[in-house]
Amino acid sequence: MLKITNLSVSYGDIPALKKVSLEVKQGDVVSVLGANGAGKTTLLKAISGLLRGDSDTQIEFMGELIHQLPPNEIVKRGIVHLPEGRQVFSDLSVLENIEVGSYSRQDRSNIKSEIAECFEMFPELVGKEKQLAGTLSGGEQQMVATARALIAKPQLLMVDEPSMGLAPVVVKRIFGLLREFVKRGITILLVEQNAYMSMAVSNYAYIIAQGEIALHGSVEDLKKDEAVKDSYLGVKKKKKD
Amino acid sequence: MLQMVLQNSISGMAMGLLYGVIGIGVCLFWQTTGLINFAHISSAMLGAYFFYTFHVMWNLPIVIAFVLAVALVALYGILILRGVVYRQIMGRKGGRLEFIVATMMLNIFLLNLTIVLWGGVPYPFPNIFGSPMNPLRIGGITIQHHSLWVLGFTVALVIGLNYFFKRTLTGKALRATAQNKDTASLMGIGVEKMTALSFAMSTGVTAIAGILLAPIYFVSVELGGGIIGIKGFASAVIGGLTNPFGALVGGLLIGLTENFSVFYISSSYRDVITFVLLVFFLIARPQGLFKKM
Ligand SMILES: Nc1ncnc2c1ncn2[C@@H]1O[C@H](COP(=O)(O)OP(=O)(O)OP(=O)(O)O)[C@@H](O)[C@H]1O
Ligand SMILES: [Mg+2]
């Protein structure tokens, strides 16, 4: 579905990603793990078109080369990016945020009922339709951002650290929803600090370190890998137990 | 006494609303670019000259002349202001200062171009908004037909803009773009298209103000000169720059204060008032009266 070859991105002279190659197959949940500053957010931004790779970069989505397209064209092809820090439009109401999320849709026939479904999925938002999104709690903002992404009808949903700053209950809920999305046929590319949680929902994982893919493999295999256990799962698991 | 107060309020209101409409244009520009266009007021001048050309020189019907004039200024906003000036400066990674200098130069260029094309002599504006010779008289108060037209246009503009920003998907998308361009583009919003739209709206709205100002200032380069533009800018700053409707309140405040100070103090203070208000607000309430729309 998505095939990245030799993606290199730099901020000025400082390289953030070096010749990253990565593949996401239809129906998969692929995790990208890595320490702070490893380049995970940069990777998602390069896929959604917010950042450009260098001249060797190739990004192919459903058989089409998309690395030259602007972000608004990339969304139309079905790649929806739920950005780090949620990035809701704080001066737009909850409802307006979700409506704006539907902007890329060509088929607008069912939008009203789909927006209603969003509120069914997040009953906490019911009654807050008119509230400015900036005044919501972090968890509620994550819900708005999730609904806003969902209404765009993603084929591939890229989620950047959905658990950031949220209480464990809310995190569980969000991950439960990701599973739900997979059942609906949405492919997911997930960036997370919380390796334990993300390994639990995904079937394939890439580990990035300092802008390079250090390791990748099926989650089954990675879970057996001693190095991975030590540096990515060990600590989290102990905390969890 | 009461009559004097009412009379001054009515005259001040019409002028104030016009400053406010110019201020709305300033806000619409600031919203998406975060910049102040120092050639802003030349859109008012161009609007008045185009309308004069179409209606008086070419004898086109008023409505057609009006629509054509506003559309042409909006087109200038997209093609010249955005297509040439803004593009060039952003393409060279220029900042605010570069944009200010460039638009100041653009303003001077447009003033001179107008003189070359239309001559420097002011044209009298036809009495299409009613003759000043036979105003309405209610009680002891005279109300110019022009003032009512200004009020009518402003109300229509506010309703129209409010509908656009609050009810249409494009309007909501424009507000989203104003808040965060990157995230807006992730929604599928074409940021370039939205910028073009706000340039067109900013210049178009100001052109309307220019046509409505012409009965007061004549069709003259004075419309594109400093002081009216500064009053429009001050209206926007007082209103909060991020809220177009706040600019109207700012404009009303300036228009009314101006009128009363002319009446109670002296007409020589007329233009100073704007600066006094501007400085006062910049010190006391720099964020303006209203919150972001
Ligand atoms: N706008 C920017 N300008 C300069 N350098 C940047 C910029 N954004 C990111 N970087 C640098 O690029 C590198 C990768 O950043 P990135 O945000 O992709 O990391 P990340 O893996 O998402 O980290 P985190 O887990 O903290 O979100 C970091 O060293 C960061 O400092
Ligand atoms: Mg990140």
Image: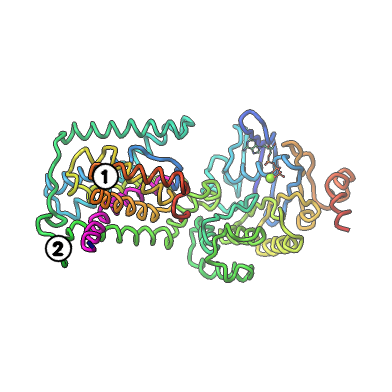
Left or right: residue B157 compared with residue A239: left
Q: Position of residue B103 (x, y in %)?
A: 36, 34
Q: Nearer the viewer, residue B133 or A85?
A: B133
SS state under label 2? strand
Left or right: residue B236 compared with residue A137: left
Query: Is the residue under label 1 in contact with that under label 2 (CB below 8 Å)?
Result: no
Q: Residue at x 26, y 59 (%)?
A: B151
Q: Is residue B205 visible?
A: no
Left or right: residue B165 compared with residue A216: left
Q: Name the mark on residue B215.
A: none
Corner quadrant of residue B171: bottom left
Q: Name the mark on residue B270.
A: 1
Corner quadrant of residue A153: bottom right
Q: Residue at x 61, y 51 (%)?
A: A81
Q: Position of residue B54 (x, y in %)?
A: 16, 46
Image height check: is A29 above or below B203?
A: below
Q: Would you name the residue on which mark 2 appears?
A: B136
Q: Residue at x 24, y 61 (%)?
A: B6
Q: Residue at x 73, y 50 (%)?
A: A192
Image height check: is B80 above or below B64?
A: above
